[in-house]
Image (tube, grey):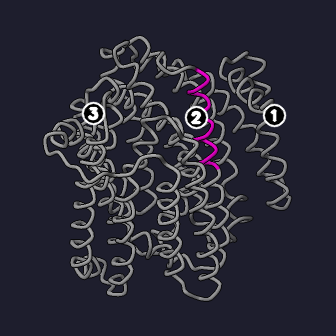
Amino acid sequence: MSESSGSIISNLVWRFAERCGAQGVSFLVSVVLARILAPEVYGTIALVTVFTAILQVFVDSGLGNALIQKKDADDLDYSSVFWGNMFLCICLYIALFFFAPKIADFYNDISLIPVIRVMGLTLIISGLKNMQQAYVSKKMIFKKFFFATLGGTFAAAFVGIGLALRGFGVWALVAQNLVNKLIDTCVLWLIVGWHPRFMFSFKRLKGLVAYGWKILVSSLLDTVYNNIRQLVIGRVYTSTDLAYYNKGKQMPNLVVTNINTSIDSVLFPVMSKAQESREEVKNLARKSIRLSSYIMCPIMVGLAVCAEPLVRVLLTDKWVPCVWYLRIFCFSYVWYPVHTANLNAIKAVGRSDIFLKLEVAKKVIGLLVLALVMNKGTKMIAGSLLLTSVVSSIINAFPNKKLINYGYQEQIRDILPATLLAVIMGVIVWSVTRLPIADYIKLIIMVPFGAFIYFAGSKLLKLEEFESVVRIVKRYIKR
């Protein structure tokens, strides 16, 4: 391998620590804010973020991945992408600014206009940050992300809670979002060794676009698809329904973001460097699927089982309607390790054309399913995610049978031990929810009991991933 095993693990640990730290703080802040603010406030923000999330895809334009994948990327490549990206970000913000009234009309809520225009500033901030992120990923110096992300998260926490306590409502959430991205970007500019130079090459940019545009379209399809349920719920139903849907997504998404983003950001650069050895790419994909499934499956199953008492204790009874959505997202996200490893392998070997075709196929199927259930209630809209997640995992794995000789059946065999063990744990722990005791006592019993069952089962079955996790933990305790 081009990268030593120790280097990969070190970067993975730093990336995971950064994600856990940032998302952990963000989650605690969201708990505090959810107790202060009404569900409708979260629904309003969710309506706006549908559009900002879609435009955010253009900020990267797939060129960040193109720079990582290109073996001999230099300052001219980075600078050309930076200046082109900034021009695009400014154009996107201007378009969003002037289209804000149209978006507000779509939702029949003119109060959204100033919120859209202020939230849209995150596009320009992200443009300033984008190449710094690509540089850190390319050079495998993920320690930089740790300090930048935590700096932004803590600053945003103080601002968000402070404004919420003073009665600023939706603007507390807007300010929290802006401050987070602004501080994060400023810290990266201070501590990362690369800064743009006054140079530009259309030829270099064109070469990167040749690879990156397919990733852009794929990401755009994925983002539109992932947000279209929010768009439908916000338009057909109410902002309160949307708030419950998004809040149910938040907790499982917290775990997935920590694990999946950590593995994704480290795995893709490593795979790209090993792209000439398909056997090595397969080994990396296999290790990724097995390890991430081993970590993610018990957390998702455990979270689904503990959902109702957890929501009552953390968010109060007013958020109990989000429990259904929380469980659906948990079982949908169980498949994410398969998605991530397969797609990274396809990108790493330079087949962005296949990547794009897969996204088109998955989204067509997903939209057809959504069209069938969109008028059957928000629970059915959420429930359709489980079906499409399983189908998408099969589609993502299909090309890798040929590309790296790692088919779907072999992948299922790799994740089966951890998945079955997690299900057994969940069934046993579920019995605690039937006891006539307070919710917080249930949680105190369920969490350690579930962890004990899972780790004892792992030890008994001698799962390789359990030993790997133990070795990693011991190594960093010694340090």
Of callouts 3 and 2, which one flags the residue occurring earlier in the amino acid sequence? 2
Mark in the foreground, 3 or 1: 3
Mark in the foreground, 3 or 2: 2
From the image, tell me which residue sits under label 3: 355
> For residue 13: magenta?
yes
From the image, tell me which residue sits under label 1: 452
User: Marks 2 and 1: CB-CB under 8 Å?
Assistant: no
Image-based side of 366 in relation to 243, left or right: left
> For residue 383: magenta?
no
- Dominant secondary structure of the residues highlighted in magenta in the image: helix
Q: Is residue 120 above or below residue 199?
A: below
What is the spatial separation of the Cα atoms under label 3 and label 2, in whole angstroms? Answer: 24 Å
| Secondary element type, mark 3 | helix
Of callouts 3 and 1, which one flags the residue occurring earlier in the amino acid sequence? 3
x and y percent of residue 240 in the render? 48, 74
Which of these two is toward me, 15 or 36? 15
x and y percent of residue 105 in the render? 25, 81
